[in-house]
Amino acid sequence: MQKKAGPLFYVGLSVFIFLVMFPFLWILISSLKPVSELFGEKAFVPFTSDPTFVNYQSVFVNHPFLTYLKNSLIVSGVTTIYTVLIASFSAYAIARMKFKGKTVILGLVLSVSMFPQIATISPIYIILKNLGLTNSYIGLIIPYTTITLPLSIWILVTFFRKIPFDLEEAAKIDGASIMQTYWRVILPLAVPGIFTTAILVFIAAWNEFLFALVLNTQEAYKTVPVGIAMFQGQFTIPWGEISAATVVVTVPLVIMVLLFQRRIVSGLTSGAVKE
Amino acid sequence: MSDHTSKPKKKRKLSERSAAYLLIAPSLLLILVIAIWPVIQSFYFSLFDLRLNNPTKSEVHTSHMIDLQRYLDNYFLLEGAIDKEVDKAGEGNAETLNGVKEDLSNLDASLLEDEKIKERYELIDEKLMNFEKIDPKEKLVEVEQDRAEEIQATLNDIEGKVNSLNDLEDPNTVKGLSSALADSIIKPNFIGFDHYAKNLTDKRMWMSIWNTVVFTVVSVAIELVIGLMIALLINKAFFGRGLVRASILIPWAIPTVVAALMWKFLYDGQNGIVAKIFEEVGLVERMATLLTNDTGAMFSVIFADVWKTTPYMALLLLAGLQTIPTSMYEAAAIDGANKWKQFLTITLPLLKTSILVALLFRTLDAFRVFDLIFVLTGGGPANSTETISLLAYKVMIAQSNFGEGSALSVVVFICVAIISMVYISLLGRDLLDDKK
């Protein structure tokens, strides 16, 4: 099936890419339109004669959008670092050591990744409320582990398995302890895999909505997804501001995807295909 | 470090095993505490009438108890309020009020006869006097069921007597205090499977399950077909492949909430370009009907989901396709098999595992759908896009009914478990196989 692509292929491909990207392009144009052009006949015109940054300004001035960004960065950043660290230990053990109950543990990890978040939220909410941890960073980071830890273990196990076993044998023969083997031999080779996992974990934490919606209800602790979702007023929807906020959130993700697409794809598909 | 190597092999193996368990321990502990325990706890909560907005039902109670803080707070205030009323009351009222007062002090005296209550009574009383903070556990004292019912009867009797009075100076205070006092007795709120019984006969719950199933089956089926087409299309060398891969990753990477808001704008009944296009094409009669009728709303939600998650499906399948050796196709071509035949006899069978894995992940994600619908339609119009997760959220958070909400979330959990088991039995042990 590895045939050379013809011109028709490129036409079809362009149409497909255009369809996928169309919503983004439209939102980008809308975010630059003055409010008057967002309604009526002008709403359907794919350009504006009077581009303006007033929507962008409004996002940061009339909404605590910077706070949302800061909160999301802190929560996703800390979640990523601590999950990947803990997951890398377990993944190393599962991928490269011999012990009983490995399949059971891997099965447990996989089943937990399938848990619906809604089924864990009521006890987590009540516990965090009693501990006074709702509306805090740590109160969001801990429950995020439910989502990110199984994901990281699952991906890291695949990466750790790919590292040649000979290296480890050599280290063992040289008398390195298990921890030394891990830090000196395995970890340096696993850096690309760990980095890939970190990107996926970060995206998962950054995009999470349900926990953030239920646990952090104060403006000062809202994350970006919750903050944006709450832009909608009760009677009016400020489409200009929403478009601008969408662009602000999307652009960094687009850059990240462009830079790391190879890694993201390898992470997404690891464990899903047997090579 | 040469002494390590001289250790017997058996010992090395043993230490490896314990090291492995040590390395896994933190993850296992976290998974137990923040995933498995909450699910069990959810099930436990679902057996109780637990409402965060009701003081006597805000916690799980398995036995009868008296809330001494509430009792003492209201007791003294009520006593004082009655004294004030007695001074100004007419003949008939004064008699009833004195009767109530006597009932109250008899009740108080009888409470103090119990050593266990007395001890705690004095402690709470002192703390209240000094305006100290009272631990929520400290204020509750367990009492026998008979005794609790007796106290409750007395309190109800007092409330009834007070409510029967007319012409009070300050009726709201006295009546309010006596009714607050009557809430001092906490009954067990264990109700067994009542929440389940109620919801399993509730049309709204079945409707939400139906909506979830429709959403899941239709969107995942479309995603599989389109995803497979895209995967086959880009499974060849061509110019700009990286760019194509990146651009189809973008819908996957953005937050679902943001995608939902984008589509809400595009579907808007007045200024949404997609709604306008659908109207021009004749898909909908008028732009405004897209999100305001049942079918239109469900279609819109599915369309947005297909846009967002087909790329993910395509990438999973593409990775599967790339593991099929080209030589197989070449051999088939020599045997004279056409493209369609090759697809049926080589691609599909070899792609089976990849397809099942992709379907497993996507089906579960789709079944748990929340963000997309929460933002795009809020479950409307008339609950026609309300999924089971959304219903559980609404009952739990919006109505503060944690017992019933937990029961619904357990239903979601059971459905997800059934779906996973079906897929995993189809996949066999492939998924967890240790050997590569």
Image (spheres, rainbow, N blue to C red):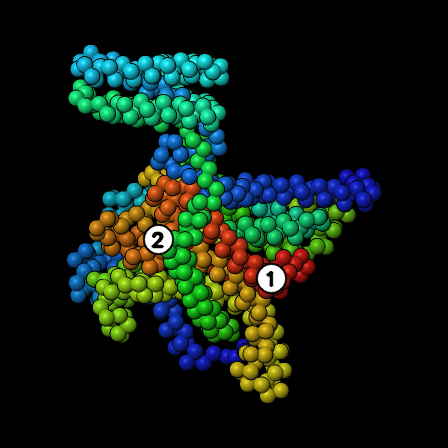
Quarter in which the C terminus of chain A is drawn: bottom right
Q: Assess disc 2: are there few (<14), some (14-19) or many (≥20) residues with their C-alpha within 10 Å of its C-alpha.
A: many
| Residue B171 drawn at (x, y percent) | 21, 23
Left or right: B222 as drawn, with respect to B100: right
Residue that label 2 marks: B374
Relative to B94, does residue A74 appear above or below in the rendering?
Answer: below
Ranked by sequence position, the earlier of labels 2 and 1 is 2
- Residue B221 quadrant: bottom left
Q: Amino acid at mark 2?
A: Phe
Which of labels 2 and 1 is toward the front? 1
Relative to A189, does residue B289 appear above or below in the rendering?
Answer: below
Relative to B183, does residue A158 appear above or below in the rendering?
Answer: below
| Residue A259 drawn at (x, y percent) | 46, 58
Label 1 SS:
helix
Quarter in which the N terminus of chain A is drawn: bottom right
Q: Assess disc 1: are there few (<14), some (14-19) or many (≥20) residues with their C-alpha within 10 Å of its C-alpha.
A: few
Residue most toward the bottom?
Answer: B336
Residue at the (62%, 46%) spot, across then down: A90
- Which residue is more in the foreground, A71 or B177? B177
Residue at the (19%, 23%) spot, across then down: B166
For residue B425, the mark is 1
Residue at the (43%, 46%) spot, across then down: B195
Residue at the (59%, 88%) spot, across then down: B336
